[in-house]
Image (cartoon, rainbow, N blue to C red):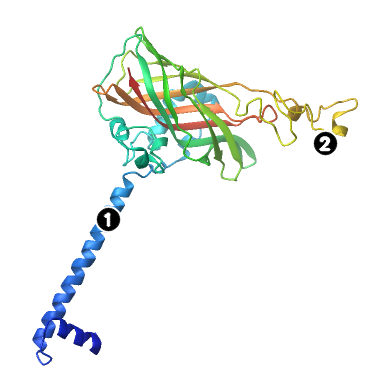
Amino acid sequence: ADRRTERKIKKSVNCHPYRPSSFTAALQHIIIINQSKIKMKLALASLFVASASAFAPSATVSRNTGLQMSLKDDLANVGKAALAGAIAVGVAAAPAQALTKAEINSLSYLQVKGTGLANRCAEVVGEDSIKPTSGQKLVDMCIEPKAWAVEEEIGKAGKTEKKFVNSKVMTRQTYTLEGIEGPITNNGQIVFTEKEGIDYAPTTVQLPGGERVPFLFTVKDLVAKGSGDTFKPGFQMGGDFTTPSYRTGLFLDPKGRGGTTGYDMAVALPGLQSGEEGDDELFGENNKTFDITQGRIEMEVNKVNAEESEIGGVFVATQLGDTDMGSKVPKKILTKGIFYAKVE
């Protein structure tokens, strides 16, 4: 310390200027105080980080090449192969900040706002079993995607093959399906029929090259048949669902053309839509259609809480993307994630 600091130290502890032992003791005393203050600041900082992370959205699950499978095999045997891949990429493991349904229900609006919790499914704790009866329902079903892949043609060594390429979600945290419910029948085999809820979510993913692929993530009209009569770890169920068009009939393209309204053709290009061939060249763009395709989902239960009548697990879904109202060939999309439901 310089002389000015030295004089302040001596004055603050009432040291005699000619007693070096008193000055040394005072200096050691101040060093100990400063160390205590630094430790307290570090403790407060770590406490703040821990409390903030409690409400942070879960980290994106790591993706690997396990998503690369053909859609034909996926639609036929998605239950075994894709669910095994979902467990391999870590989808089955609950995130460190996962909350149960009771914990989520105890939070206020301000505690949830801006944290991403509204886009996450609840965690189920337990490995019990539940045997539902016909007439009961699955309610509060939540389906949260964790990883996406789009089928692309990849050229290698002069050959072209189709593979699923990992993609990045571009949609804000509004892509989770929530509040889905429907009746259960159990005649030796559990069958769940989806009836209502927030069962669709417009979503966009981006390929590594920058191309963006929109699709309507949904489970509309799902009829899922189970592998037994009891919900327990290892129980699987799956079935087909309907995928409506990404665009509705009222949507107008940049030329003002639509399915149920707007122009019938591009009025700024009359020369291309007249004559002997008519609008053959632009038929796909002019003839707007509401395309309904079919997808498939497979789910595997890995957690059951009999006391709360809750089940949870992983899922894999395959479906087609947007056709731009009939003008584009849709891409095939593979989605993996977790789900939650309650037996009522």
> Residue 301 appears in which quarter of the rendering?
top left
The quadrant in which residue 263 appears is top right
Looking at the image, residue 114 lies above or below residue 269: below
Q: CA distance from mark 2 to mark 1?
A: 63 Å
Q: Quadrant of the N terminus?
A: bottom left
Figure check: 90 above or below 278: below
Taking 35 as reference, is 322 above or below it?
above
Q: How many marks?
A: 2
Residue 184: x %, y % from top left: 38, 13
**Disc 2: which residue:** 268
Q: Amino acid at mark 1?
A: Ser
- 96 up-or-down from 141: above or below: below
Which residue: 48% across, 27% down? 317
Residue marked by disc 1: 46
- Indicate the amino acid at tag 2: Ala
Q: Position of residue 58 (x, y in %)?
A: 38, 42
* Sooner in the amino-acid sequence: mark 2 or mark 1: 1
- Residue 13 lies left or right of residue 166; in this view the side is left
